[in-house]
Image (spheres, rainbow, N blue to C red):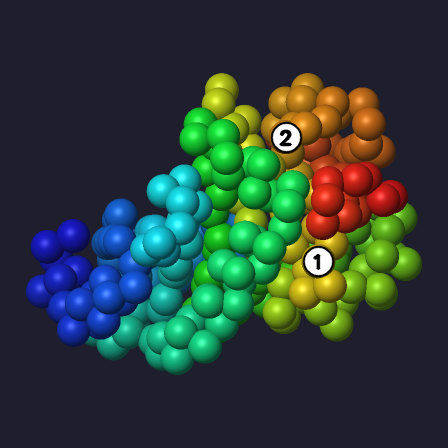
């Protein structure tokens, strides 16, 4: 935390006007939505919302230079509002043992890197029609990681049209459902699926 303040203190001070800073570090990081690169890795809790809703922010940091935060500032309020306007996600947040992370990498929530993984995974498992239906929404989609007690977690894509696609999860149950309610496949130790969920929490497909 002190190291990042020493290098990008003005940026952190600006962010702290609207977020509580939960974590801050420079890291060389690779993940489901980030091809391995050097980033400022931060966790931010939006002020005036829920303590178990936070933003996982990764912004490129190369040669002592931080990438632009303008896309983050222009989009993040809308992404947070979309989560808070989705009734079934509010039920998740109402249980304080759960957390919802809104991912944001460089210029969008669903990075190009994870979009490629998502599309390839669904096409490989016969979901090409769904990919074609939602592909144009992915740049504005909200990529969520939902943690539950017992180290269970799931990855979801909240679309601009209000629907959510449950993509990966771990465990025999996930959120409000049993795993048996979904058509699934194995994905590197996770269960993969492409279940479409309505804003109210009804499984549509």
Q: Residues within 10 Å of mark 1 (few under 14, many from 20)?
A: some
In the image, is residue 65 above or below residue 113? below
For marks 2 and 1, the one nearer the N-term is: 1
Q: Which residue is mark 2?
A: 175
Q: Which residue is mark 1?
A: 162
Q: Residue at x 17, y 60 (%)?
A: 4
Residue 132 is left or right of residue 78, and the answer is right
Q: Quadrant of the C terminus?
A: top right
Q: Residues within 10 Å of mark 2 (few under 14, many from 20)?
A: some
Q: Is residue 46 visible?
A: yes
67 or 103: nearer the viewer? 103
In the image, is residue 182 above or below residue 4? above
175 or 183: nearer the viewer? 175
Percent x, y of residue 80: 49, 59
User: Could you say whether the residue bearing mark 1 is in a helix, strand or loop?
Assistant: loop
Q: Residue at x 43, y 57 (%)?
A: 36
Q: Residue at x 56, y 53 (%)?
A: 83
Instruction: Identify the mark at residue 44; answer none if there is no mark.
Output: none
User: Could you say whether the residue bearing mark 2 is in a helix, strand or loop?
Assistant: loop
């Amino acid at each position: 935390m002190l190291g990042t303040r020493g290098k990008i203190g003005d940026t952190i001070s600006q962010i702290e006007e609207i977020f509580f800073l939960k974590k801050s570090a420079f890291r060389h990081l690779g993940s489901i939505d980030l091809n391995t690169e050097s980033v400022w890795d931060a966790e931010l809790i939006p002020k005036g919302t829920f303590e178990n809703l936070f933003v996982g922010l990764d912004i490129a940091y190369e040669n002592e230079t931080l990438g632009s935060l303008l896309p983050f500032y222009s989009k993040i309020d809308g992404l947070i509002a979309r989560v808070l306007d989705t009734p079934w996600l509010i039920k998740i947040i109402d249980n304080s043992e759960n957390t919802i992370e809104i991912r944001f990498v460089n210029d969008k929530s669903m990075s190009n890197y994870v979009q490629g993984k998502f599309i390839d995974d669904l096409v490989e498992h016969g979901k090409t029609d769904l990919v074609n239906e939602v592909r144009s929404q992915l740049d504005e989609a909200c990529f969520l990681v939902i943690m539950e007690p017992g180290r269970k977690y799931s990855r979801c894509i909240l679309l601009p049209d209000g629907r959510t696609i449950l993509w990966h999860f771990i465990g025999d149950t996930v959120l409000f459902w049993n795993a048996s309610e979904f058509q699934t496949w194995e994905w590197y130790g996770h269960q993969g699926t492409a279940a479409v969920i309505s804003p109210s929490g009804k499984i549509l497909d």
